[in-house]
Amino acid sequence: MKIAIRYYSSTGNTKKLADAIAEAVRAEAKGVDQPLTEKADLLFLGSAVYAFGIADEVKAFIGGLSKENVGAVACFSTAALLPSTYKQVSKLLREKGIPVLTDEFHCRGQFHAAHRGRPDENDLQAAAAFARRVVGEEK
């Protein structure tokens, strides 16, 4: 299975999750500024909530995807207060005909004084377990 990982992180929180996922599935995590140039059976896509929405960089990355080069997407995200970006990201992907797994990973991320230290080691272990579960290496 060809796995790709892309993420957007302005504070470093989502990057921490991307790195944990990358280690778990033995793939390289890259920012969304790196286009997906090869076919991926599975794309882990990481984002965060910024001003109640997903970053323009994530929207632009999704805009460059096609159903011909992405088999399915697994979403992961961080946010200080709001729920995950799953609904917004999956809507954009489905509009392009790209399947999105219903299994997602989301955790709190530190923002100023809120959720200090998050994502923490427990969050990173849970993100890794999520990734292994998605690729069928863990139940």
Image (cartoon, rainbow, N blue to C red):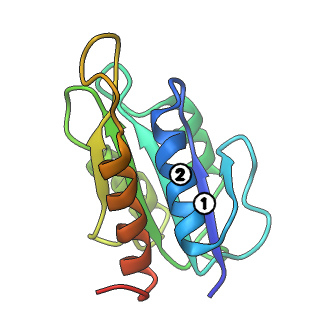
Q: Earlier in the sequence, mark 1 or mark 2?
A: 1
- Circle 2 is placed at which residue position? 18
Under tag 2, what secondary structure? Answer: helix
Q: Is residue 66 left or right of residue 59?
A: right
Could you say which disc has been placed on residue 99 in the image? none
- Mark 1 vs mark 2: in front: 2
Count of numbered marks:
2
- At label 2, the amino acid type is Ala
Q: Determine whether 108 is above or below 22 in the image.
A: above
Residue at image x 57%, y 52%? Answer: 19
Determine which quarter of the picture holds residue 5.
bottom right
- Dot 1 alpha-carbon crowd within 10 angstroms: few under 14, some 14 to 19, many 20 or more: many
Instruction: Compare residues 128 and 33 and report the one nearer the observer.
Output: 128
Instruction: Identify the residue at image location x=60%, y=53%.
Output: 6
- Proximity of marks 1 and 2: CB atoms separated by less than 8 Å: yes
Which residue is nearer to you in this view: 104 or 130?
Answer: 130
Q: At 36% from the left edge and 79% from the top edge, which residue is drawn? A: 133
**Which residue, given by chain and number where applicable, does mark 1 sit on?**
5
The part of the image, by quadrant, that contains residue 27 is bottom right
As helix, strand or loop, the secondary structure at mark 1 comes to: strand
Query: Is residue 80 left or right of 48 when viewed as pictured?
Result: left
User: Which quarter shows the N terminus?
Assistant: bottom right
Up the image or down, 119 lies above or below 2; here it is above
Q: Quadrant of the C terminus?
A: bottom left
Locate residue 80, reporting x and y percent.
Answer: 27, 26
